[in-house]
Image (cartoon, grey):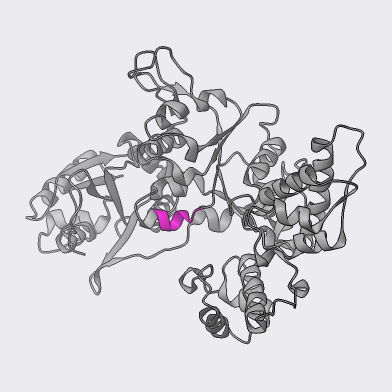
Amino acid sequence: MKKTEQSASKQSWLVCWIGNTDLKCVQDEATTGPIAMAIEEAAAYDRVLLLSDYTEQEGRDYQVWLEKLESCPPVELRTVELASPIDYTGIFEQVCQVLEAERLPRPDVSLTFHLSPGTPAMAAIWIILAKTRFPASLIQTSLRQGLTAVHFPVELSSAFLIDFMQQTSSGVDRFTGHTGIIGKCEALERQKQRAQRVAAFDVPVLVLGETGTGKELFAKSIHEQSARKGKPFVAVNCGAISVEMANSELFGHVKGAFTGAVESRDGHFREAAGGTLFLDEIGDLPLDAQVRLLRVLQEKEITPLGSSKAVKVDVRIIAATHRNLAKDVQAGRFREDLHHRIAVGILNLPPLRARGADLELLIDHFLDKAHVECSLGHEVRRTLTDDARQMLLGYTWPGNIRELSHTLVRAYLWGKGTTVTKEDIREALMEATEEALPILGRPLHDGIELKSILNEVSAHYINRAVGQARGRKRETARLLGFASHQTLGNWIRRLGLKSVPEDDLEDG
């Protein structure tokens, strides 16, 4: 674990408790404790932050001894008082106080927590904090294996919060119903149940899903079922905010903060005071605004541009994106610590193509809505012809529910008489491709490519299965009746399905 190249603005800190074995080194310099071993073998740290529940003098003596090591960086000592070295609550509170006093987490600091020094209770708290509030790497040392990294890939918040909610009934029973969310398929019902549970807990929520799947509708539903009902619900499209104005839009500014700031502005956080701020397409938020947002989530306060005075804010954050934030984190486009902060309650909305019979319910709903919006109140209600309905059912709806709604409004506007016909639907679709035609209704007089049609059917069902299985290989294969996920891979390669890259499919 040798030191790698880092940007000049990024420092690496080692943080740990002083343990009894470390203190023995002061009296017997022939021994090497866990902390010294980590420093000598890693040679990777710009600063060491030590926590000690021993006497001030014992801690200082060890600090002096440690700083004599040739490879030792600057050392800071924080002496704290614990009722007991196995008092989990006390350990948690003291560690948080020390790290918060250092303004952590910070974009210019990469943290490493050392698990070996101290008690098992101290190690357990390091693991919890590293995977939640203070993102950090974990290491341990031993005489036999030396320095090793501790790989603990589970994100505690996303892995266990939903299970916790399912076990917790207090305060949840009154949160029922999802106004405006239409559908009964299993995948949607699962997300509605999760939304109902998470509404009762005042935690950040991340809503994932393709464009047009109803992410804002779910956010409003969570708000309406929460204790913040009746307070402001402010929706912001992060992708529509310019890079230059992102901080001003969200956090506000004072008069004269920049050229053109002729008057002060509150910003969306203060507009949503006491309620919910919905940050749609949060993956498009500029990096500097991400840093400010992280501070708001940690400190519950904002500092308007041009001001030195922080303002307390009480706002619940619900974020949404169609992007793969995990990949954006790897690519450096999205902050990992912010991802951990917003992804506490997670919803993953299914695409329309994976919702089965829900499509029929939605067609009827939006047809009724189109009649209300597009008639003058005295026209006869138009109905769908059978072939028009079949065209709608045979289309894959890449724009999901939003595209379906807009298509039916256009068809209603352009149609004549008492029916909406197949031709009305064809003209209303943004892209009237062969895919929009019912698979069994292709014209024969022009000749057909039977193999091409069969491949189209196969691709259609593979795409639907991938969506319904949320990208899990084995579940996708099961839905399609394949003996193994290797067979699924063979079909994807044979059909050349660029929409389903094998690398994006997850095992399971």
Q: Residue 348's image quarter?
A: bottom right
Part of the protein shown in magenta: 323-328
Question: Is 462 positioned to the left or the right of 113 in the image?
Answer: right
- Magenta segment, prevailing SS (helix, strand or loop): helix
Asked which quadrant contains residue 440, the reply is bottom right
Q: Is residue 242 above or below residue 6?
A: above
Task: Name the residue nearer the viewer: 168 or 495.
Answer: 495
Q: Is residue 105 above or below residue 469?
A: above
Which residue is at the front of the view, 147 or 419?
419
The residue located at (7%, 51%) in the rendering is: 68
Residues 70 and 156: in front is 156
Q: Is residue 311 left or right of residue 112?
A: right
Q: Is 347 above or below relative to 302?
A: below
Residue sitting nearer the eye, 486 or 151: 486
Residue farthest to the bottom? 483
Give residue 401's position: percent from left, percent from top.
69, 51
Residue 475, x across and y down, in percent: 62, 74
Give the x, y percent position of residue 51: 28, 45
State left or right for residue 352 relative to residue 503: right
